[in-house]
Image (cartoon, rainbow, N blue to C red):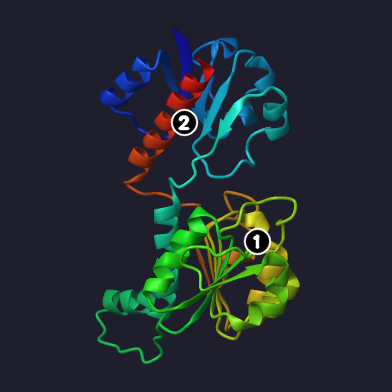
Amino acid sequence: MKNLLLTGCFKYSEEQFELLGQLGYKVHFMQQEKDSLPLCASDVDATVCNGLFLSHDISEFTNLKFIQLTSAGFDRVPVDTIKERNIELYNARGVYSIPMAEWAVFRVLEHYKQGWFFKKEQDGGKWTKHRGLREISGRKVAVVGAGNVGQEVAKRFQTFGAEITGFDIHTNTTPYFDHMMLTNQLLNLIGEFDVVVITAPLLPTTKGIISREVLNCMKENAVLVNIARGGLIDEEAMCEVLSKRKDLFAALDVFVKEPLPEDSPLWNMENAALSPHNSFVSDGNNRRMFDVMYRNLKNFITEEQ
């Protein structure tokens, strides 16, 4: 029987363990990937993990043939080594798209409807109206990255009556987008959008795509939402621009360094809303993650036979 190593925070039911066993795997589980392995690395045939190889040298996993990531991005695994060894590699495509898209809409609505203002007034026992509320309907929304997450974001903003433009490496017709533009057009067009949501992967070609120039050119009263990776934004430049342009608002779930350093100026900015890389969390993730992992593992076994 082959060995399958599961890591991370996902909870698996007895039924799910049985299904994996029926595929011919003995299942081993470790929650913290920095901990010692529950078996020899050379005995692991397949793994479902996130940043396992940040703490354990992949060269020691000599029999590894299958990796299922619990993340959508590939930036926490040695992709080149995996390709050289012909190890099958899968990401968690589609698993987190729904909660992340909902989070993006939530953050914009929270800002447009001034949710924290009313909570503050409630806590103080005050009956205070706010006349500066805004609506999403009729707004122009840019989604940087038109993949799974981007499409779910576009779908939800479209429901509110917004006009959606996607920025990607292609201009193909894409579900839920009214327009598609190339990412290299972002700087020239950024000033048109009321809301900018970042969902692109972090690659050498996308690092710092939200540059100082892009930030300076953003529309008055625009909202920037990042639910992808911190490195997509020039964070130092963003801090400087936000401190000067109080009309801008940034809802940030990801950062260059995580946890966000205590001395980051972002903590004290009134025009920034911060969350600790939490937008992907949802009660539906376990089911979707297992479905993706089980399907990929089953297909892999079939192809091997």
**For mark 1, what is the residue?**
170
Q: Is residue 129 left or right of residue 186?
A: left
Q: Quadrant of residue 61?
A: top right
Element class at badge 2: helix
> From this viewpoint, is residue 240 visible?
no
Q: Is residue 266 above or below residue 90?
A: below
Residue drawn 66% across the image and 15% down it: 60
Can you tell which mark lies on residue 129? none
Check if mark 1's residue and mark 2's residue have beta carbons within 8 Å.
no
Residue drawn 46% across the image and 27% down it: 299
Q: Is residue 153 above or below residue 140?
A: above
x then y, percent, for residue 46: 52, 20
Sequence-first disc among 1 and 2: 1
> From this viewpoint, is residue 182 visible?
yes
Element class at badge 1: loop
x then y, percent, for residue 287: 33, 39
Camera-nearest residue between 87 and 59: 87
x then y, percent, for residue 172: 60, 63
Q: Is residue 255 left or right of residue 4?
A: right
Amino acid tagged 1: His
Q: Quadrant of residue 213?
A: bottom right
Choose mark 1 or mark 2, whichever is in front: 1
Question: Mark 1 and mark 2: span between their CA atoms?
Answer: 27 Å
Q: Is residue 39 left or right of residue 25?
A: right
Q: Residues within 10 Å of mark 2 (few under 14, many from 20)?
A: some
Amino acid tagged 2: Asn
Can you tell which mark lies on residue 296? 2
Tell which residue pokes out farthest to the top in this image: 1
Residue drawn 44% across the image and 85% down it: 138
